[in-house]
Amino acid sequence: MNRYVLEADKYIIEETFGVSSDSKTLFEPNYNVMPGQVMPIIIEEDGKRNIITSAWGLKRKSTKDIIHEIGHEIVPEDEDLLKLSEEKPCIVLASGFYKWKETVEDPLPFYLRVLTQEVSGFAGIYSAYEDEKGQKIHSYAVLTMPANPLVEPLDDTMPVVLDPKDHSRWLSGESSEMIKKGFSGNHLLPDMSVFRVPELVNDPSNNSKELIQPIPKLRNYDGEEEE
């Protein structure tokens, strides 16, 4: 996943995740979120949930690598990532995400979302430290899992979409255990939708609701649907 969308009412976000904020800009919709942008995430500190802003693209003090997505299966194999998953789990707020279908000509964008969730919580981990110049670096990455049959035609991975009942488990100490147990998106199949959207999303400068408007399927002269 290299792009996602956050379009949800402030009240819905606060009610769903048990947080509150007086910020006027924190909940502004973003229809073309990409790595490097600063977005809201949910963390828990001293037993209290907070909604804060962080940059998408995990930066660690120990390496110069910047990671925007991490396969959950590799976390237990990386001591640093495993420690972050235990100490700094987060929930990334999203309404849906984009995937591209490779074609002979140009990749075609599709938008996917969970219809039963007005705002979803993607499993993530974050890092927070000061660099050698004293600048505070706060960043996050989204965890991925194997794609379910709806996503498979577009990609072999998808973000880990947490069940709302697991939000507390993820934030309050069970994240590494959940990672080791593994994730599956098959249970989401009845509630997920996927549809092609305008290629406007390919341009990073575009950011409007038009990006997630479905493109009607066309029919050829034989009455068959075309992509």
Image: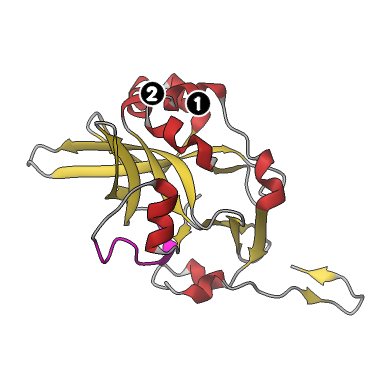
Q: Is residue 23 left or right of residue 162?
A: left
Q: Amino acid at mark 1?
A: Met
In this view, 9 is above or below 87? below
Residue 64 showing in the rendered view: no
Distance from the alpha carbon under mark 1 to that under mark 2 = 12 Å
Q: For mark 1, give the secondary structure.
A: helix
Residue bearing mark 2? 82
Circles 1, 2 touching at the beta carbon (< 8 Å) = no
Instruction: Find the magenta span and give its range.
Output: 23-34
Determine the residue located farthest toward the right in the rendered image. Answer: 222
Mark 1 or mark 2: whose residue is earlier in sequence: 2
For the point 61% across and 54% down, the residue is: 116
Q: Is 26 within the magenta? A: yes
Q: Main secondary structure of the magenta part?
A: loop
Closer-to-camera residue (196/179): 179
Q: Neighbour class for label 2 at 10 Å: few (<14), some, many (≥20)?
A: many
- Where is residue 135? Give x, y as percent: 11, 44
- Where is residue 1? Give x, y as percent: 51, 49
In this view, 221 is above or below 192? below
Question: Which quadrant is home to the C terminus?
Answer: bottom right
Residue bearing mark 1? 178
Q: Amino acid at mark 2?
A: Leu
Determine the residue located farthest toward the bottom in the rendered image. Answer: 221
Q: Is 139 within the magenta? A: no
Closer-to-camera residue (167/210): 167
Q: Neighbour class for label 1 at 10 Å: few (<14), some, many (≥20)?
A: some
Q: Is residue 13 left or right of residue 43?
A: right
- Where is residue 122? Give x, y as percent: 47, 44
Q: Is residue 214 left or right of residue 126?
A: right
For the point 89% across and 80% down, the residue is: 221
Q: Is residue 90 left or right of residue 25?
A: right
For the point 49% across and 55% down, the residue is: 119
